[in-house]
C-alpha cells in the first residue's frame, strides 16, 4: 500500500536560516507525483511544489526546493531564508500513478514548523 | 470570489441536528473532493466527484451525504453525527480527475464540532 511518512512532528528554525522537512514514501508504482502543501493556522492548504517521478531535476519554486532521492524514496522540502510567515504545518503528499482511475492524494501526518525571530 | 470557498467556516452542532457544508470553486475545474482532517491524523479522502458524478466513496458512514449539483458546487450533508466526527473538513478541486500533473486547490475548511 502507498504510504507517506513524515518523522518530524515539529521543527524550529531561526529566521533567515534554511530548514529541511523530511518526507519518505512507499509505493510500488513506477509513475507517481509528490507534492508539498503548507497549512497555516487559517486552515487552507496551499500548494508549494511538485515533483514527478520521472523528473530528472529537483523541483524548485522560489525559496522552496525539493530534494528528490528516488532510490531512497525520499522527497524532502528545503525552505531557504526562512521567514516568520513560513510558520505553519507542512504536508507531504503522493498522487497515485498517472494511469489510475482517481487523482487521489495520500498525505503524511505533517510537520509543524516554527520560525523564530 | 476567487479560488475555492467554503461556508460556514465554523459549525457547532448537536448529534441530532442536520446541517450542510458548502464548497464553491471559481476555477473552472471539473473535479472536486471532500477531505476530513482530524487532529494528529493524515488527511482522509472522503468523496471524489468528476463532472458532477461521484467516482469514489472511501467507506464513509452514511451520516455523511455528498451532493454535487454542478461542477462548481459541492455540498456535504450531515445528520446524526457523532462526537468523533469533529474535525476540519476540507474541500478541494482540480482541473481534471486524471492527468500527469494535477494540483489540487483547497478551500479554507469548515471546523466542525459535534457536541
Image (spheres, rainbow, N blue to C red):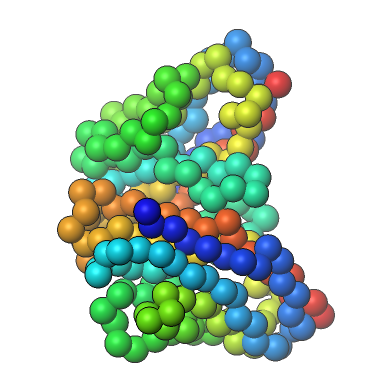
Figure disc tally: 0
The residue drawn where x is 38% and y is 81% is A71
The residue drawn where x is 51% and y is 40% is B36
Nearer to me, A85 or B16: B16
Looking at this view, name the residue that lies furthest to the top. Answer: B16
The residue drawn where x is 61% and y is 21% is B82
**Residue A17 lies in quadrant:** bottom right
**Residue A15 lies in quadrant:** bottom right
Residue B80, placed above or below residue A49:
above
Residue B91: x and y, percent? 45, 43
Looking at this view, name the residue that lies furthest to the left. Answer: A99
Residue A105: x and y, percent? 39, 55
The reply to whether residue A74 is in sight is: yes
Residue A29: x and y, percent? 27, 64
Residue B110, placed above or below residue B106:
above
The reply to whether residue B108 is in sight is: no
Residue A5 located left or right of residue B3: right
Residue B74: x and y, percent? 37, 35
Residue A47 located left or right of residue B86: left
Nearer to me, A80 or A110: A110
Residue A79 located left or right of residue A82: left
The residue drawn where x is 64% and y is 21% is B13
Residue B44 located left or right of residue B25: right
- Check the picture and name the quadrant holding the C terminus of chain B: top right
Nearer to me, A4 or B43: A4
Amino acid at each position: 500500500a502507498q504510504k507517506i511518512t513524515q518523522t518530524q512532528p515539529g521543527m524550529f528554525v531561526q529566521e533567515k536560516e534554511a530548514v529541511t522537512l523530511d518526507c519518505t514514501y512507499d509505493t510500488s508504482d513506477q509513475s507517481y507525483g509528490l507534492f508539498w502543501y503548507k497549512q497555516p493556522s487559517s486552515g487552507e492548504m496551499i500548494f508549494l511544489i511538485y515533483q514527478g517521478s520521472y523528473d530528472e531535476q529537483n523541483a524548485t519554486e522560489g525559496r522552496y526546493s525539493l530534494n528528490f532521492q528516488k532510490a531512497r524514496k525520499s522527497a524532502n522540502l528545503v525552505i531557504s531564508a526562512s521567514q516568520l510567515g513560513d510558520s505553519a504545518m507542512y504536508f507531504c503528499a503522493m498522487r497515485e500513478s498517472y494511469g489510475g482511475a482517481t487523482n487521489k492524494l495520500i498525505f503524511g501526518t505533517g510537520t509543524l514548523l516554527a520560525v523564530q525571530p | 470570489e476567487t479560488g475555492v470557498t467554503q461556508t460556514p467556516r465554523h459549525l457547532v452542532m448537536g448529534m441530532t441536528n442536520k446541517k450542510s457544508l458548502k464548497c464553491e470553486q471559481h476555477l473552472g475545474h471539473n473535479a472536486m473532493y471532500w477531505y476530513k482532517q482530524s487532529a494528529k491524523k493524515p488527511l482522509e479522502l472522503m468523496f471524489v466527484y468528476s463532472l458532477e458524478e461521484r467516482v469514489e466513496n472511501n467507506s464513509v458512514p452514511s451520516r455523511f451525504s455528498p451532493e454535487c449539483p454542478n461542477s462548481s458546487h459541492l455540498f456535504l450533508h450531515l445528520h446524526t453525527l457523532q462526537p468523533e466526527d469533529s474535525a476540519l473538513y476540507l474541500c478541494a478541486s482540480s482541473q481534471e480527475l486524471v492527468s500527469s500533473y494535477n494540483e489540487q486547490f483547497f478551500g479554507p475548511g469548515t471546523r466542525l464540532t459535534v457536541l
